[in-house]
Amino acid sequence: MSAASAKILQEELEKKNVTLVAVSKTKPAQMIQELYDVGIKDFGENRPQEMAEKYELLAKDIKWHMIGNLQKNKVKYIAPFVHLIHSVTSAALLKTINKEAAKNERDIDVLIQIKIAEEDSKSGLDIEEAKELIKEINEGIYPHVNVRGYMGMATFTDDKDQVRSEFKELKSTGDTLAQLLGQNENYSDSDPVLSMGMSGDYKIAIEEGANMVRIGSLLFGSR
Ligand SMILES: *Cc1c(COP(=O)(O)O)cnc(C)c1O
């Protein structure tokens, strides 16, 4: 897709209050620059070192989104500048993010990743595990982390009904969890982020309540 078409897509999404995260993993900085030049500022990466390298090369007002499985020992590469970590799947990871945020004298925004897909390869917490984590968060033991909402990935399938029902599940899980989190006044200052939908399923995701979509191959071509 050309940069001009990407801009049109972003504007269409904006009208629906949906944030476009352009997933630039494996793609060169030059391609990010082309989208940046038409006003796209949110980019998603799944490797900490790759994100850090691109951060160094590109404009400092880019909002970098960490979207992949994140190893604890790599949080340090992105902690100084990352805008939003979509992929919190354990208390141990949250603890590391909190520690690295403190070292950098900042707070880091995160999403809790919920498992909705059938595939074992897709990670995330189930609702009970997520409730446990939010209870801990509400106890105030991660003061440098702000939970902004929820992320999930649907099963990779042509079965649109299945994809839709998985997104519905994430939306209702997110609503339940948001209520729990909302009991903590530190976290109720904005609507929860619901990050769901990729190139192949973002339209369904938006119909089911996504307000952030993560689109890679549609924008940048296949990887
Ligand atoms: C790669 C990736 C995307 C983007 O996928 P496309 O199908 O290329 O749009 C979105 N979310 C996550 C978590 C990813 O790893």
Image: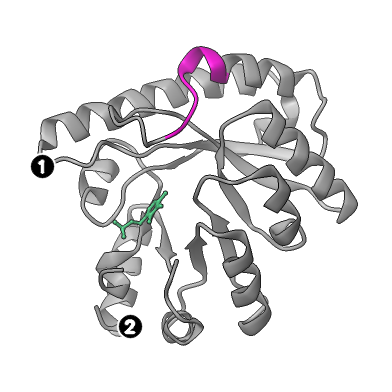
- Report if residue 127 lies within the magenta region: yes
Relative to 74, residue 29 above or below? below
Relative to 139, residue 98 above or below? below
Quadrant in which the C terminus appears? bottom left
Could you tell me residue 173's position as x and y percent? 42, 21
Mark 2 or 1 closer to N-term?
2
Please give the name of the residue rendered at 28% of the width and 66% of the height, measured from the top-left corner: 217
Where on the picture, by quarter, is residue 63? bottom right
Relative to 202, residue 166 above or below? above
Left or right of 160 on screen, residue 109: right
Left or right of 126 on screen, residue 80: right
Secondary-structure class at tag 2: helix
206 or 142: nearer the eye?
A: 142
Could you tell me residue 176's position as x and y percent? 48, 17
Q: Which residues are magenta?
A: 123-130
Observer-side mark, 2 or 1, equals 1
Please give the name of the residue rendered at 63% of the width and 82% of the height, measured from the top-left corner: 59
Which label was assigned to residue 158?
Answer: 1
Disc 2 versus disc 1: distance between alpha carbons? 28 Å
Q: Is residue 192 visible?
A: no
* Residue linked to disc 2: 3
111 or 96: nearer the eye?
A: 96
Three-letter residue code for mark 2? Ala
Where on the picture, by quarter, is residue 20? bottom left
Proximity of marks 2 and 1: CB atoms separated by less than 8 Å: no
Please give the name of the residue rendered at 25% of the width and 67% of the height, measured from the top-left corner: 218
Q: Is residue 202 visible?
A: yes
Please give the name of the residue rendered at 30% of the width and 52% of the height, measured from the top-left corner: 198
- Report if residue 133 lies within the magenta region: no
Three-letter residue code for mark 1? Asp
12 or 197: nearer the eye?
A: 197
125 or 169: nearer the eye?
A: 125
